[in-house]
Image (cartoon, grey):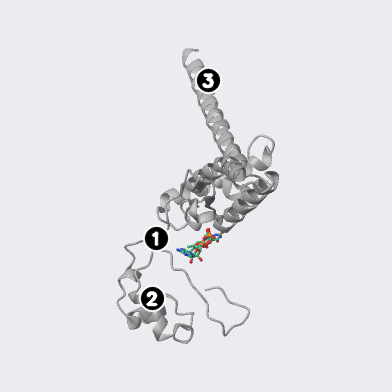
């Protein structure tokens, strides 16, 4: 519940948790107050949440994040190219808000469509073909980045989250030592709007390959060393 400039304005909150969490079993506003007061004794819940809102939340069904997915066709030409349908934003790519890219990628779609219209003198038929061919590879890369970018932040799998965090720190340190060869994890690169999603994915995959090969070579060197010691 982030504070707003005007403290009297209504604040919104997202509750992101597992489907079997007991918060989804609350039946009415009273149970909601009881649960929140016990969970967050430091927050004056009764003052900031109205009885109507508590009741509304308790009786709502909630929703779930979409799995990362994209749509292959971004446009349709109808009625012998007299009418067109074009899709942008969540309509062509949707994913959980893990990397904060929903709005960014939607705005990028708009910019690319705008560029395509300009470079085709507003000829919609040609512009839409260009828009799709320019944008699809980046969208495919973005969807892959969503799967590997920051997958365990909601603590769905605590051990995996720890392993993932170790991997992120390890890569970050290595990339600082060898910046021209290794890249940090996508979660850092994605903040740089000058690098395309495709480029981020390529850098991430290249770093993974280099690390695998280096670990394999170290293992082989270790085995060769042990073998030599045994035979001597
Ligand atoms: C909990 C949560 C957290 C998020 N956090 C982030 C974040 O930190 N950073 C980030 O970049 N993104 C975040 N996102 C994603 C972001 O909100 C979306 O990616 C973005 O809003 C997509 O914009 P859009 O214009 O494509 O779609 P929308 O914003 O969904 O706009 C579609 C509009 O179309 C309207 N509409 C639907 N059907 C019809 C119809 N039949 N007729 C007329 N109008 C219709 C809808 O009412 C809506 O206003 C988050 C999303 C969620 C749910």
Q: Residue at x 53, y 80 (%)?
A: 10
Measured as percent of width and height from the top left, residue 154 is found at: 45, 58
Between 188 and 4, the one lying in front of the other is: 4
The crowd level at tag 2 (other Cα within 10 Å; few <14, some 14-19, many 20+) is some
Q: Which residue is disc 2 drawn over?
A: 57
Q: Secondary structure at mark 2?
A: helix
In the picture, measured across the screen, residue 19 lies left or right of residue 134, that is: left
Rendered position, 153 above or below 177 = below
Image height check: is 64 above or below 228? below
Q: Residue furthest top?
A: 232
Residue marked by disc 1: 64
> In the structure shown, which secondary structural element does the residue marked by tag 3 occupy?
helix
Q: What's the residue at 52%, 77% (across, down)?
A: 11
Residue hosting label 3 = 225
Q: Residue at x 35, y 76 (%)?
A: 58
Q: How many marks?
A: 3
Q: Position of residue 36 (x, y in %)?
A: 40, 77
Q: Is mark 1 within 8 Å of ligand 1?
A: no
């Amino acid at each position: 519940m982030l504070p707003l400039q005007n403290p009297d304005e209504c604040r919104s909150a997202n509750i992101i948790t597992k489907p079997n969490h007991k918060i989804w079993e609350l039946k009415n506003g009273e149970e909601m107050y009881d649960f929140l007061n016990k969970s967050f004794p430091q927050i004056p819940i009764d003052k900031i949440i109205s009885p109507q809102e508590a009741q509304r939340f308790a009786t709502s069904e909630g929703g779930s994040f979409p799995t990362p997915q994209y749509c292959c066709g971004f446009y349709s030409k109808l009625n012998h190219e007299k009418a067109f349908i074009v899709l942008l934003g969540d309509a062509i790519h949707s994913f959980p808000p893990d990397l904060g890219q929903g709005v960014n990628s939607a705005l990028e779609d708009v910019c690319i469509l705008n560029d395509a219209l300009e470079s085709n003198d507003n000829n919609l038929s040609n512009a839409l073909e260009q828009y799709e061919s320019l944008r699809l590879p980046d969208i495919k890369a973005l969807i892959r980045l969503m799967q590997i970018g920051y997958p365990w932040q909601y603590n769905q799998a605590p051990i995996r989250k720890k392993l993932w965090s170790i991997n992120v720190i390890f890569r970050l340190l290595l990339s600082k030592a060898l910046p021209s060869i290794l890249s940090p994890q996508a979660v850092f690169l994605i903040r740089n709007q000058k690098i395309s999603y495709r480029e981020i994915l390529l850098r991430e995959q290249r770093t993974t390959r280099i690390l695998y090969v280096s670990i394999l070579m170290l293992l082989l060197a270790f085995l060769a060393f042990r073998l030599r010691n045994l035979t001597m």
